Amino acid sequence: MKFKADQTSQKLRGGYYTPQNLADYVTKWVLSNHPASVLEPSCGDGAFIQAIHNNHADAALAVECFELFDVEAQKAAQRCLDLGLGNATVTEGDYLLWANKQLAEQHQLYDGVLGNPPFIRYQFLENEFQVQAELVFKHLSQKFTKHTNAWVPFLLSALALLKPGGRLGMVIPSEIIHVMHAQSLRSYTGQVCSKIVIIDPKEIWFEDTLQGAVIIFAEKKIDPAQETEGVGIVSVNGFDFLAEDPNTLFARTPGINGETVAGKWTKAVLERDELALIQALVAHPAVHQFNDIATVDVGIVTGANEFFLVDNQTVEQYQLAEYAHPMFGRSQHCPGIVYDDSQHAENQRNGLPSNFLYIPDAFDELPLKVKEYILYGQSQELHTRYKCRIRKPWYKVPSVYSTSIGMLKRCHEAPRLILNQAEAYTTDTAYRVRSTFTSSENLVCSFLNPLTAITAELEGRYYGGGVLELVPSEIEQLYIPVVEGMEHDLAAINEQVKAGNIAAVIRSQGEKILARLGFTQADNDKLMQIWEKLKDRRLRK
């Protein structure tokens, strides 16, 4: 297989092998349903084959395994022989190619599915495997995106090949709960399964990687018309949960139905009373969805930030002052909720690249030193980059405008809006926001409250490092309580946030705003607890 040269071999083959104790636990749950046949779509060297043996499976159990890599397939086949699994087969080859043939004929072949599918980004797959991945979505009438990962079509097809009443147990990336590219999988799973349980650890199970993983237990509906119990998430710390029978764990975990199944699954982390409080707030007429009271757009896309975002020394060296404008795009540029002339001056003193270069003139009309800077950029072949080469001249950046509010794309603790008093520009590491309902200052200050922080955790996504990221479509779903005409101590809030006390600000602003809506101190305290729980889960605390 041919993959991107700058990726590790482990990443490119998706080879994160399951610890044996986890494989044994997952297999115990699937086998306790007394299956006659089991599928393992990506068996590696055979951890789940070993688990079948460790769980004393019936000798008549038919086990069908697939493995793409020949060396691993040979190891798995030898393990079947060594363990005396006479009714097990290991096929070397592309599982998705085989699965699509079965899906085309609408086969349901297995009573159980086990495994740990490969974690490979779509763009790193060989073209033939990309074709097979996309075909899985087509067969199942699910929306496809090229942002997907190989484990998604593996799981989709395995569910489709599962017989009614069958069980699926797999170790998969934790991003199933919240990333956008897994939405088709979440929707399909909620549609065909009677109940889904996610075992969500605080630890990283795979060594030498930031890849978070979870266990998914899913039971397929016996009757397609059967109501689903929804999704339940069990948070675990360490391996103590392995002492509990997986059937007991599955049965005792309540599923949360409705919008949880249809959308992201993060809400399943919450208790019913917690969800009820959130719903009560969301239903209040003074609580608005972001999309109803503001607009959000991406920042300026330069194609070469290292050229267009410069410090004062570069401005002076190439006499760029006429073309330099204030900008922010990172938390270090704006540690508070206000970007004003004072913050800009501080950034310049600290040597940060806080100047955005907008050069609209033709090359022949430019001063000599500015030409020299552009030629320097060309010597670095910046003009050949896609975003640069499709515009004329390459150094004239399009869509240059500022808004009264900005918002950073990523955050560690909680997202915040930034009052852009300096009329600074923002790059594509930030968003441009306009209020359509209240004053910019009121929106920026009202944004800091526990309900909005909670909905950011529910709507956003994060990866191994735990940094929260929100794209515009997710920001539009956030809920903000807004009291028109409410006065805020902007300067004090800004200083507190700059000092690293954003949690204290969220609490105090919540008390102030929610009291005006008729909610109690106890309600605000409960919301803070919910936010802390979601945040700590993301940060693996």
Image (spheres, rainbow, N blue to C red):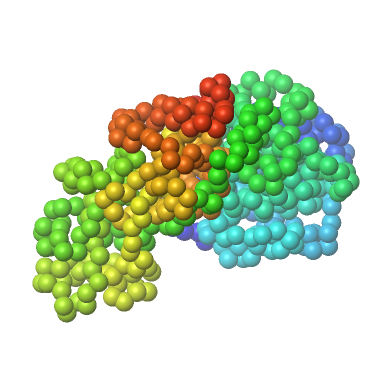
Q: Is residue 12 left or right of residue 54?
A: left
* x 36%, y 60%: residue: 300
* x 60%, y 38%: residue: 284
Residue 11 visible? The answer is no
* Residue at the extreme bottom: 364
Judge whether 104 appears above or below 57 on screen. Answer: below
* x 34%, y 40%: residue: 337
Question: How many marks overall?
Answer: 0
Q: Nearer the viewer, residue 538 or 139?
A: 538
Percent position of residue 401, x then y: 33, 62
Q: Is residue 42 left or right of residue 146?
A: right
Q: Quadrant of the N terminus?
A: bottom right
Percent position of residue 261, x then y: 71, 43
Residue 485 visible? The answer is yes
Q: Nearer the viewer, residue 120 or 187?
A: 187
Q: Nearer the viewer, residue 442 or 428?
A: 442
Q: Is residue 283 left or right of residue 418?
A: right
Q: Is residue 58 left or right of residue 344?
A: right
Percent position of residue 457, x then y: 53, 38
Judge whether 300 appears above or below 442 on screen. Answer: below
* Residue at the extreme front: 485
* x 43%, y 27%: residue: 508
Percent position of residue 481, x then y: 52, 39
Judge whether 348 appears above or below 428 on screen. Answer: above
